Image: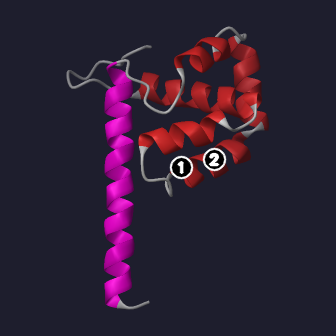
């Protein structure tokens, strides 16, 4: 791979990482940019153990979907793509997203629970 292409790939990757951090920062504020509010509500109407099982069963699908969202330019495109996934995969993604948010520490070093 040429140095030019390596630079483009690195820049693209760094841009996606920055968007992912922005997404998590907004999520900590309660702004969940890639999930529809009604879908979040539906997901959390399910039993937590059922959501854990869904995530285990659909982990590859969640990873594939997450990787696919990296190729989409806007948060709206990411949200539309996720809305087009099957309900169980959507709910597994939402569960894993909130698990990630709950595991993040705030600037004061405390864990924030959503």
Report the side of 85 relative to 23 (left or right): right
What is the basis of the colouring in this image?
secondary structure
Q: Report x, y in % for residue 1.
A: 44, 89
Is residue 112 on the magenta stretch? no
Q: Circle 1 sits on which residue?
A: 69
**Residue pictured at 50% horizontal, 44% vertical:** 77
Q: Locate residue 26: give its quadrant.
A: top left
Report the side of 48 relative to 70 (left or right): right
Is the residue marked by circle 2 packed among few (<14), some (14-19), or many (20+) residues within 10 Å? some
Q: Circle 2 sits on which residue?
A: 65
Give the residues in magenta: 3-29
**Residue pictured at 51% horizontal, 24% vertical:** 98
Q: Is residue 62 above or below residue 14?
A: above
Report the side of 9 relative to 84 (left or right): left
Q: Is residue 46 above or below residue 74?
A: above
Report the side of 87 relative to 62 (left or right): right
């Amino acid at each position: 791979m040429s140095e030019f292409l390596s630079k483009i790939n690195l820049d693209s990757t760094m841009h996606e990482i920055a968007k992912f951090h922005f997404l998590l920062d907004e999520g900590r504020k309660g702004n969940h940019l890639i999930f529809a509010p009604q879908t979040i509500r539906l997901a959390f109407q399910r039993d937590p153990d059922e959501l854990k099982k869904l995530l285990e069963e659909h982990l590859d699908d969640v990873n594939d979907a997450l990787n696919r969202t990296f190729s989409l330019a806007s948060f709206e495109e990411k949200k539309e793509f996720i809305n087009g996934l099957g309900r169980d995969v959507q709910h597994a993604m939402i569960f894993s997203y909130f698990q990630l948010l709950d595991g993040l520490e705030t600037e004061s070093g405390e864990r924030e629970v959503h």
